[in-house]
Amino acid sequence: MLYSIIIRQRTSYHYVGSCPFIPEAQGEGKTFDECLNNTRQSVEKCLEERRENGEEIPEEDPAPQVILVYS
């Protein structure tokens, strides 16, 4: 499954990522790539936990994107 991820640049060396479809999935990093990787891992972990707990798995994004927002 593919989900959109939003990456926000907080400072020159700090990025924060989130997934609109899975609000508890978040990540951060010193670089864009590190943040993206950490956020993807968080999404995977959250989905795994939802499956184990019998919780609903959100529908995947029909056109997943990685969006960079400069603050």
Image: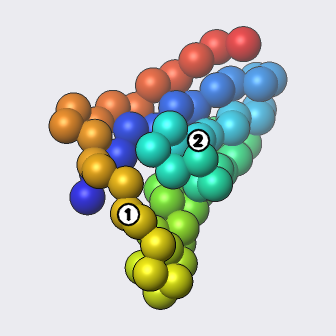
Q: Is residue 31 left or right of residue 3?
A: right
Nearest to the observer: residue 25 or residue 38: 25
Q: Residue at x 33, y 32 (%)?
A: 65
Q: Which mark is residue 18?
A: 2
Q: Quadrant of the N terminus?
A: bottom left
Question: Which residue type does callout 2 highlight?
Answer: Ser
- x, y percentage for residue 42? 56, 62
Name the outermost residue toward the bottom. 52
Give the labeled residue for mark 1. Answer: 57
What residue appears at the point 49 percent right and 59 percent down from the top-left corner? 43
In the figure, 67 relative to 38: above or below?
above
SS for callout 1: loop
Residue at x 59%, y 47% (from the top left corner): 23
**Secondary structure of the residue carrying numbered label 2:** strand
Q: Which mark is residue 46?
A: none
How busy is the neighbourhood of tag 1: few (under 14 within 10 Å), some, or many (20 plus)? few
Amino acid on which the number 1 mark rests in the picture? Ile
